[in-house]
Amino acid sequence: MGPKNRSTSRMRKDDGMTALLTLDPAARRSVLALLGCMAGADGDVSEEESEALAGAALALGVTDGSILTVPTLDEIDFDSMDRQARLLAYAGAVWMMLADGLTLRRESSLLSHLAERLRVGPDMARFLGSFARWVRTETELPWHREADLLFTEAARRLARVEAHQRAA
């Protein structure tokens, strides 16, 4: 992907990784496994996808080498993921699809399948997809910071949406 050109002045300035706080350890592993499946969806894991996957592993605190073995979708326990984990997994899948700057038909097809498996409705899929696209295309961060921003800020925005829905 080409150089990003937008300022990151409105983003968080702290250096602390906070994606660890958004998901429990099992959910972090499931999300990372799903990102691995998305990275390999087109039959090839590009250098950018590999770097993005390593960055996501660091941001999620999964540093035991488990990303070296990518499971199939059937091996991921979607049913044990709570709503937040499913939504963040979907945002992560969109982000990973965009990592190499190419969106192939197999990746788009897998993303549609994931929306069903993760029980992400069309409006929420658009919301999360737009945010993931913004993170991927409009920030100038190393992969691990980009992944951290994706998961932490998506969790914050989801909390605001849900609070607004409860208040309505």
Image (cartoon, grey):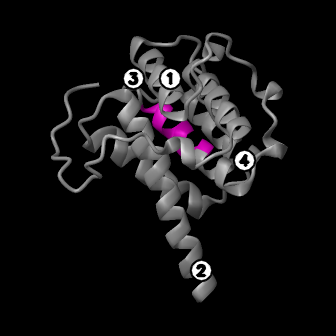
Q: Is residue 141 magenta?
A: no
Q: Is residue 91 magenta?
A: yes
* Residue under pointer 3: 100
Whole-Å distance between the Cαs marked 2 and 3?
35 Å
Circle 1: residue type: Leu
* Residue under pointer 4: 118
Mark 2 residue element = helix
Which of the labelled discs sits on residue 155, or is there none? none
Disc 3 residue crowd, few under 14, some 14–19, many 20+, Cα 10 Å: some
Mark 1 residue element = helix
Residue at horizontal 15 percent and vertical 39 percent from the top:
5
Circle 4: residue type: Leu
Most common SS among magenta residues? helix
Whole-Å distance between the Cαs marked 4 and 1?
20 Å
Disc 1 residue crowd, few under 14, some 14–19, many 20+, Cα 10 Å: many
Which of the labelled discs sits on residue 165, or is there none? 2
Q: Earlier in the sequence, mark 2 or mark 4?
A: 4
Quarter of the figure with the C terminus: bottom right
Give the x, y percent position of residue 1: 29, 25
Q: Nearer the viewer, residue 164 or 104?
A: 164
Q: Earlier in the sequence, mark 4 or mark 1?
A: 1
Q: Is residue 167 left or right of residue 77?
A: left
Mark 3 residue element = loop
Q: Which residues are magenta?
A: 89-98
Q: Earlier in the sequence, mark 3 or mark 4?
A: 3
Q: Earlier in the sequence, mark 2 or mark 3?
A: 3
Q: Quadrant of residue 145?
A: top left
* Residue under pointer 1: 53
Q: Earlier in the sequence, mark 2 or mark 1?
A: 1
Circle 3: residue type: Asp
